[in-house]
Image: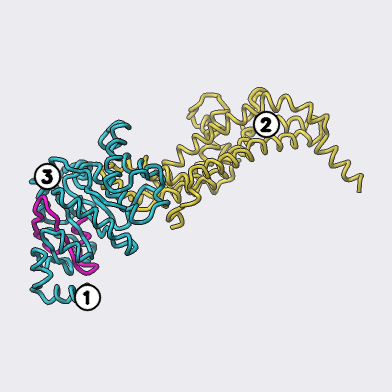
Amino acid sequence: MFDGLIKIQQTFFDPHEIAEVLPQLILTGLPNTILLAILASLIGLACALVVAVGLSARARWLRGVCRAYVDILRGLPHILTIYIIGQGLPLAGLALFGNNTYAYAAFAIGLIESAYMAEILRAGLQSVEKGQIEAARSLGMSPAKCFVYIILPQGIRRVLPPLTGQFILVIKGTALVFLLGLTTSQREIFSIAQDAAINNANLSPLTAAGIFYLLLTVPMTYAVNAWERRMGVQSKRVGGDD
Amino acid sequence: MTAQTPATQTPAAQGGQRILYDGVNLSFGAHHVLHDITLEIPGGQTTCIIGPSGSGKSTLLRCTNLMERPQTGRILIGGDEITAKGTDIDRLRRRVGMVFQHFHLFSHLDVMENVTLALRKVLGLGREEAEARAMAQLEAVGLGGFERRRPADLSGGQQQRVAIARSLAMEPQVMLFDEATSALDPELVKGVLELMTGLAKTGMTMVVVTHEMRFARSVAGQVVFMDKGRIVEQAEPDRMFDRPESPRLQHFLDQVL
């Protein structure tokens, strides 16, 4: 019984192993993971917004294109998508970002996440009551202003919880960047831990990496919840379910 | 809960914008909603449109600011043909305020922001000027001190009065009311009607779709009775309510009075 516990401790919680990898995790891995997550989130959110609007467009062809985009990117294994974009694009002569692995990775992860976020955003945007849109239009607001000041702020607030879940997936998804090959200084949390784990034949560095992921994701969830409460949306999600 | 005279006393409102519907037709698919409507709404007074539900009265109202577009026929406001091709719809709607049955306040904004949003983003006013104008309207509708409340924290009557203030702050030349009191609890109807009465007295051109026959009788300059997409009768209120000519209007009045 104790034997087993000790083995688990040695494999996953070896303080020596963790201490050794810690400086690298903090100095190289953490900034890289955060940078990659922010880049991918911004790309993802921007693409998702466009696709979400397209998904509820009146033109059938546009809806079709956006639907296909969502279906394909959600349906493919993420690893494959990352290879297709990170290796395929440069091979096809579309070296958008030169040799910058990071940019390809952020782009690929961003596109994958945008497919999920687009569906979430579409639900949010469509939940804004038609009457409010009519009221805004009756005051002389153009469709664009109506979207920016009425539909978007309410649509996003109503889907903040699922959207936060998606941002967490982005943070964790940055681990897949190792597929594209990284230099030492480019490695993010997971690559560093994985390399250390392989070199030392011990999984403790991965445990340390896990703790870092939790340190990023859990406070973010709480921060978003607090922000949402402050916005006071929870008390009056008027018609948010239709 | 005192509803005073709204603050809008603009020259434009005083001038009175005549509205003319000329042979207006509108169908939704096979459903012919408006049948060859020809009607004159005199400027500077209130016209009430009454009729059973489904009679097309709300649709006619919604044509007046092009929320619906007639398939044929013309609509003129103050001499401008709004149904003409190339009409700037957003510019037109600045001149024509609309109040809805279900208020439709912007639920993510507080009362002040509800009133100032269009002032700032459509008329381009600065924050201070917009808030001063909004404040005057909010006080006029009896809601001074409610600026930082959220719509969900207000009663239906208060919400509707914010909606009216929101429209009036744009200083429109015409106000459209689409069953503005139908969704209110009975005890809240009075305040909103008093507010509308006060507004009518300022000489605003108002088109009011309503089931409030007492309001129509006391405030309207003319009453229009619609049924099945057609105008069946139109007259001064006393004639309309005391001596209805058509059997359909008689029947309708028997039902509602």
Q: Regarding mark 1 in the picture, which secondary structure is present there?
A: helix
Among the chains pictured, the one given cyan colouring is B
At a point 33% along the width and 51% down the height, the residue shown is: A58
Locate residue B149, reporting x and y percent: 41, 45
Amino acid found under the numbered disc labelled 3: Gln
Locate residue A206, reporting x and y percent: 74, 36
Say which label, 3 or 1, has the lower sequence index: 3
Q: Which residues are magenta?
A: B34-62
Residue at the extreme front of the image, as rendered: B2
Say which of marks 1 and 2 sits in front. 1
Say which of marks 3 and 1 sits in front. 3
Q: Real-space Cα distance between discs 3 and 1?
A: 36 Å
For disc 3, the marked residue is B14
Residue B228 in which image quadrant: bottom left
For disc 1, the marked residue is B255
Q: What chain does mark 1 sit on?
A: B
Among the chains pictured, the one given yellow colouring is A
Locate residue B237, reporting x and y percent: 11, 64
Amino acid found under the numbered disc labelled 2: Ile
At a point 71% along the width and 37% down the height, the residue shown is: A211
Disc 1 packing (10 Å; few <14; some 14–19; many ≥20):
few
Residue A189: numbered disc: 2
